[in-house]
Image (cartoon, rainbow, N blue to C red):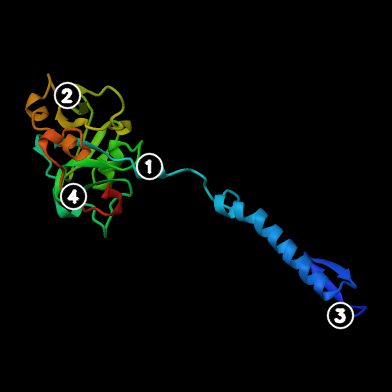
Amino acid sequence: MTLAPPHFLTYILGMKIPNIPAWQSALIGVVLGALATALITPLLASQEWWPGHSSHDHSSESEYHTHADFLVVINDQLLDLSDPALMSTSKRALAPDVHLHDGDGSIVHYHAPDITFASFLNSIGITLTDTCLTAASQTVCTKKETEVVLFVNEERYEGNPAEYVSADLDRILLYAGERLTGTPREYLDLVEDRACIFSGSCPERGTAPAESCGLTCEM
């Protein structure tokens, strides 16, 4: 058996341990290495100790996928939102969790909860506040002779339109123009009713086409 020189200093975990045989030093290193691995591996797996790491589980959000039919009318102009520039694709997302795609400008797709309808509109260049709507180079505000009104499932929305969060299959009419004297039936009837096809809740009406807006749509 060969012993380490009398003045040999072995370093283990930062501590100097003098006069230890080389084979004992090697054995201690193996044992401590195995112990460290056993202690650290679970932490690495959980990642909860990493600086800046969030332990929030995004799995539920990645599975979230709802749809709503909508129509925007400003000064009696029905906005056509089917322009390719307003579509999200696999190469260009206008917003991370809400979008239009495949040339369909009347159904909004949500991939995360709690996104306001106003946030979606903002992503395609339309500004909705609590009292005003700006779209197609026009601005209409709620005043004495004009108003901005949101209808959800044919019922007038009484809350702040800028804070409205749609539910799956909602049918939304956003109206901005002369004050209404009644229900704008001519516009409500133009709000489509196809969201259920994309949500898969009306299979008798057919299957939704494959969505090509990227990974968020492959569900």
Q: Any mark on residue 61, and which? A: 1
The amino acid type found where label 1 is placed reads Glu
Question: Mark 4 = which residue?
Answer: 210
Nearest the viewer among 97 and 173 is 97
Q: Earlier in the sequence, mark 2 or mark 3?
A: 3
**Residue at point 15% right, 44% down?**
105
The amino acid type found where label 4 is placed reads Ala
Residue 195, percent across and down?
18, 36
How crowded pointer 2 is (Cα within 10 Å; few <14, some 14-19, many 20+) is rated as some
Mark 3–mark 4 CB contact (< 8 Å): no
Residue 190, percent across and down?
8, 32
Q: Earlier in the sequence, mark 3 or mark 1?
A: 3
Quadrant position of the N terminus in the picture: bottom right
How crowded pointer 4 is (Cα within 10 Å; few <14, some 14-19, many 20+) is rated as few
- Residue 10 vertical placement versus 218 (above, below): below
The amino acid type found where label 3 is placed reads Thr
Question: Mark 2 = which residue?
Answer: 154
Mark 1–mark 4 CB contact (< 8 Å): no
Q: Nearer the viewer, mark 1 or mark 4?
A: 4
**CA distance separating discs 1 and 4:** 20 Å
Task: Classify mark 3: helix, strand or loop.
Answer: loop
Nearest the viewer among 132 and 208 is 208
- Residue 49 vertical placement versus 118 (above, below): below
Q: Earlier in the sequence, mark 1 or mark 4?
A: 1
Q: Nearer the viewer, mark 1 or mark 2?
A: 1
Nearest the viewer among 185 and 136 is 185
Q: Any mark on residue 2, and which? A: 3
The image quarter containing residue 186 is top left
